[in-house]
Amino acid sequence: MINNWTFGQRVAGGYAVMIGFAIIVSVIAVYALRAVVESKDRVITHDAQVLIEAERLQAASEAASSAVRGYLIAREQRSLDSLRTARSELTTIFGRLQSLADADEERRLLSAVERASETHRQVTDEIIMLGRTDARAEVIERVFEDKVFPARDRFRDSISSLVTHEQRQLEQEKQAATDAARNAIVLLAIITLVAVLFAIVVAVALSRSLGRQIGTAVGQVQSSSAELQSAANQQATGAKEQATAMNEITTTISELLATSRQIAESAQRVAGVAEQTVGAARTGDLTVQKANDAIGAIRRQVDLIVSHMLELGKKSQQIGAVLDIVSELAEQTNILAINATIEAAGAGDSGKRFAVVADEIRKLADRVAGSTKEIRGLIDDVRGAVNTTVMQTETGSKAVDAGGRQFVEVAASFKQIVALVSTTTEAAREIELSTKQQSTAVEQVNVAIANVAQATKETEASSGQTLQTASQLATLSRELLRLVQPQAIVHSAH
Amino acid sequence: MSGNQAQLTGRAEALREAFDRSFAQPPALEAVRTENLLAIRVVGNPYALRVAEIAGLFADKAVVPVPSAVPELLGVSGLRGAIVPVYDLAALLGYPARAEARWMVLARSREALALAFGMFEGQLVVSLQDAISTAGERPRERGAVRAAGGLRPIVHLPTVLDDIHKRVEATRSNRKEA
């Protein structure tokens, strides 16, 4: 992770560690000074004060004893006043000592002093009462010996014990403060030594690491500057080719601009033609509708023709029936004529004239029969023609229907053509508009290409500057390498 | 169409002239000897009958079949108020299948007898020069006549009637012997 740190990060890290050590040293020093000061303050503010108050207590007790003795000796009110003052002083001192006492031993010794003081006060009050009653000196002396002196001694002893305790406490606190100061000094010296050693290690490591890193970077800068030189050369070549290409692009774009204008004009003409086509298609639609009506009329006529043809066929059948009768009559006439001929033949010479007439009748009947055959043939032809005509008319009617449907499709196609041509018109207009926009865009592109060509020339110039800068960079990197790794320069020189 | 109409009109005009001419001209005396024949077809084959051997021509007459031992007898028919036996000419001429016989002729003979055949084509008036004698091979056919359709055999009705009489007689004698 540290290997990935930058130069600044490493230096900042080293300084941060050093600052950390300085802060630790300062904190420890401050803590040690505060501990020493607190010890000394405690010695001064607490132990010395308690000792002073104990001394004052001792002095007040002595003053009280002196006032009692003075009253017993002189019986003066002034001694009682002194006694009251001394007792008041004792009460005040007791109050301050109680506020200062913070240890159990101190409170116990102070309680013992208070109890001794109270006992001494009761005894002194008793002897003062005796003195006011004018008791005898022996009694007073005895009370003195029996009560006051022991009480005074206990009072003194208790105060002495307190004083001794406080003196001992004072000495202990002084020694503790001195020890704390000494320990702080030793700790500070050790930490300072450690910080100095760490600073030396960090300085050496940073020097080696940064030298190696900067050397590597400078090597890379050298190779990069060489690549930059070749790249600058290539860039200069490329810029020249780009300038040539830009000229060709400018020519092409000029042609493109002319073509776009031609397209716009063509699109305009297409739109005009499309509008004319719409008109023609609408006219064609009307024509198709008229033709459709005409086809309907033709269809009705065809139906009428079919009806007439069928009627003609029926009439032909009727003619055929009549012709059958005529044919039969001719046949019967023929038979009669032949029989008349036969009879005439049987009549001999007298029947010859009858035979001639009969023969004429027979010939006539033969001709009638022949004519009926021809008529039958003609009627058959007529019926065949009628059937053919009916079939062809039906075929024609179907063709007319198909034509009508095709006309409907043609009409639909014309409508579709109208719609499509409208779409074409819109598309042509859009093409015209788009082509105009395209022309504008191409002009803008032309301007931009000119700018690019200018930029290419500038690039060509700047690539020369880049080449020069790359050379200077290579020189600088060698000098920098010489600064950080002189041995590398020597090796490379060799 | 107009051409056909003109043709028809022309034919009608020719008919009318021929009809009028037949009444206007004197009776034609035959310069050459002619013979009247009836052109018929038996089972599709052309034949001719001499008018002189015929007593009458009939068509579509009802023939009532009667049982007979003579297979050529079709039946009997009422002709000119008499019941006349009708024989099949095709069978008599030796044709095996009995064809439809719409026409019949009444033979000129002692006994009334009719012969039925399939088709009557018309009357032929031919000169005797056109008649060819071919007697010998077929006894029922005496000669032939050269007409428009080629040679037409002439059926000799007396021979045919004799055959019928012989058959009838043979049948009667067979029946008597039986």
Image (cartoon, coloured by chain):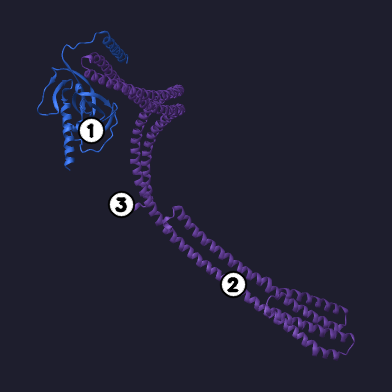
In-front residue for pair B136/A317: B136
The residue type indicated by label 1 comes to Ala
Give me the chain that's purple: A
The alpha-carbon separation of the residues under discs 2 and 3 comes to 62 Å
Same chain under badges 2 and 1? The reply is no
Q: Which one is in front in this view, the residue at disc 2 or the one at disc 3?
A: 3
- The amino acid type found where label 2 is placed reads Thr
The three-letter code of the residue at mark 3 reads His
Q: Are marks 2 and 3 in contact (CB under 8 Å)?
A: no
Callout 1 secondary element: loop
Quadrant of the rendered image containing residue A318: top left
- Which residue has dot 1 on it? B99
Instruction: Count neighbours of disc 2 (C-alpha within 10 A) and say few if under 14, some if 14 to 19, many if 20 or more.
Output: some
Q: Residue at x 14, y 20 (%)?
A: B131
Real-space CA distance between mark 1 and mark 3, rounded to the nearest whole angstrom = 144 Å
* Mark 1 burial class by Cα count in 10 Å: few <14, some 14-19, many 20+: some
Task: Give the letter of the blue chain.
Answer: B
Q: Quadrant of residue A414?
A: top left
Residue A491's tag is 3
Please rate how many residues cluster around mark 3, counting C-alpha atoms within 10 Å: few if below 14, some from 14 to 19, many from 20. Answer: few
